[in-house]
Every structure is written in structure tokens, then in C-alpha cells.
Image (cartoon, helix red, strand yellow):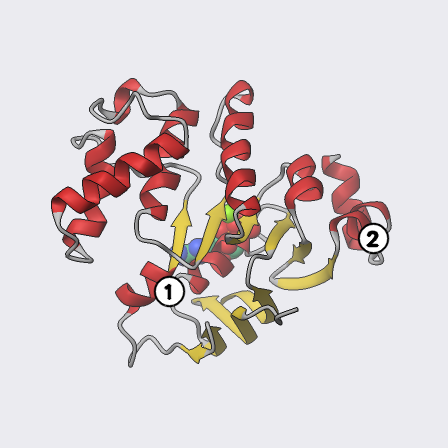
Amino acid sequence: MHEKQEMIRVEKLNKSFGDLHVLKDIDMTVNESDVVVLVGASGSGKSTLLRCLNFLEIKNSGKIIIEGEEIESDTHNLNEVRQRVGMVFQHFNLFPHKTVLGNVIEAPTQVKGIRKEDAIKAGKTLLDKVGLGDKYDVYPSTLSGGQKQRVAIARALAMKPDVMLFDEPTSALDPELVGEVLATMKELAEEGMTMVVVTHEMGFAREVGDWVIYMHDGKIVEFGHPNDVFDNPKEKRTQEFLGSIL
Ligand code: ADP
Ligand code: MG
């Protein structure tokens, strides 16, 4: 059996905003095809951690190693790194003046320099895959939240990332639309995509997650398999947090 490749490794990562120390000595490893679910109370630093992994925020200290290569914001082309580490946000951030297909082909054509015909072909395949094969030419404003989020997923996938980061992808959705987005993410996980997912959807975490990380006040308090963490949390703070949301 081949050993899983290490996709992301973080060592002693620290991030502050002014005097506010948000990430405190974070260590984590994400291996190929792993689905790592990140949970924790609001303000515990989950989004900041994802944003550091995607270099939307620049760390103060520590190491971020992507696919074996330590990335430094002053010496690396961060746009190139972001192509390998895609991100999906709570608020879909689609381009409102572009069609669904236009959204999906924008970065491949503009950033990667893919020929438009090729980008269109690949974009249509991705939209078919997320169940939006009949929506190529409509504008985002005509879509439901769940459909918009599936466009956002297709758009991120269009850059052929090696890792996908999801920051509360279903938190802005009406409850009846959550399932379709989770189903799309589950499919992606089953195809072997490496994923780090911030979510409060504990059913998804249990069913799809390989690992769960519980963050509290900028630190990783607990890490383990979902069933172990959820049924047998070792730390009192994890128990209290789970008690508050389950
Ligand atoms: P979570 O996603 O777990 O809710 P965040 O990572 O968004 O937590 O935020 C962690 C802390 O960092 C919060 O106190 C938040 O107010 C603060 N914070 C996040 N982004 C910024 C920023 N750009 N400037 C200043 N403070 C920030
Ligand atoms: Mg957040």
C-alpha cells in the first residue's frame, strides 16, 4: 500500500491581529484524501486558520508546508499556491455580472491562461457534476443559495486544486438547501479530494470526516477520529462545546 502523501503541514503557526493573538502554536497535518473537519465556537480562529492555509492572511510565525514545500509569502507566488489550495466561503462571492459558466471559466482563462474553448468544456463538465447542467447561462441572482454554493464549488474545482478548504459552506443556507451542498461535498470526498472543512454539521463530520479538530481560543484542544471525539471527548472543553451544539 502506498503511503499517503502529506498535503499540508502546519508547525507552530501563530497569527495576531494587532494585540489580538488569534492562532496559538497550531500544529496540524493533512494527508492526501483526508477530510479534516474543523469545529469550535465562533471566534476560536477557524476562519483565520483556513485563510492562513490559503495565504489570504499572512502568518506571524511558524511554518506552512504545502505538498512538501515550505511556503513563504515573500518568496513564493501566492497565486500559484492558491491554485493548489482552493477555497469555498460561507458567502459564495460569485461574480454577479457573469453567468454561471462565466464564473466557472473566469479564473482558468484569466489566471491560468487556459484557452476559452477548453475552459468552457471543462466548466460544463464540472457544472454537470454538481447538478447544474441546466444553469450554464443564467446569472447567479436567479439561483437558490444551495445552487450558488454549488457554482462556487465548481468554480474552485475549475482550478484543479489539490486541496479544498471550506469555511462554513452551508451556514448561510436555508435548512432545506443544506443537504444538496453537503451531498456535493461528500461526492468530492469520495473521489479522493483532500478537504479541510469548517462546519457545524455534525452528521457530515461523522459520516464524511476522517479526522476532527476541535479549536478553542486559537488552540487545537482535541484531535481524533469523529466517533472518538464526538462520543468520547477527552477534554472538558470539547464536551462542553459538543453539549452546546448537539
Ligand atoms: P471563527 O472563524 O472561529 O469564528 P475567526 O478566525 O473569524 O474565528 O476569528 C478569530 C478572532 O480573530 C476573532 O476574535 C475575530 O474578531 C478576530 N479577527 C478575525 N479576522 C480579523 C481581522 N481581519 N482583523 C482583526 N481581527 C480579526
Ligand atoms: Mg469563521
Say above or below: 148 vs 214. above
Query: Residue 240, position in %: x, y?
Result: 79, 46
- Mark 2, residues whose alpha carbon is within 10 Å: few (<14), some, or many (≥20)? some
229 relative to 175 in the view: left or right = right
Q: Amino acid at mark 2?
A: Pro
Query: Residue 15, position in %: x, y?
Result: 48, 69
The residue shown at (54%, 18%) is: 176
Respond yes or no on whether mark 2 lies under 8 Å from ligand 1.
no
What element does badge 2 sit on? loop
Query: Residue 145, position in %: x, y?
Result: 40, 25
Query: For residue 206, what is the image quadrant?
Result: top right
The residue shown at (36%, 47%) is: 157
Residue ID for mark 1 = 55
Q: Amino acid at mark 1?
A: Phe
Say above or below: 144 vs 162. above
- Mark 1, residues whose alpha carbon is within 10 Å: few (<14), some, or many (≥20)? many
What element does badge 1 sit on? loop
23 relative to 125 in the view: left or right = right
Disc sitting over residue 233 in the figure: 2
Disc sitting over residue 110 in the figure: none
Along the viewing direction, whichever of 231 and 243 lies nearer the viewer? 231
Look at the image and tell me in which quarter the N terminus lies: bottom right
Along the viewing direction, whichever of 245 and 32 lies nearer the viewer? 32
The residue shown at (35%, 47%) is: 156
Say above or below: 78 vs 211. below
**In this orientation, does residue 196 appear?**
yes
Say above or below: 246 vs 157. above
Query: Which of the marked residues, 2 or 1, is nearer the chain's N terminus?
Result: 1
- Dots 2, 1 in contact, CB < 8 A: no
54 relative to 139 in the view: left or right = right
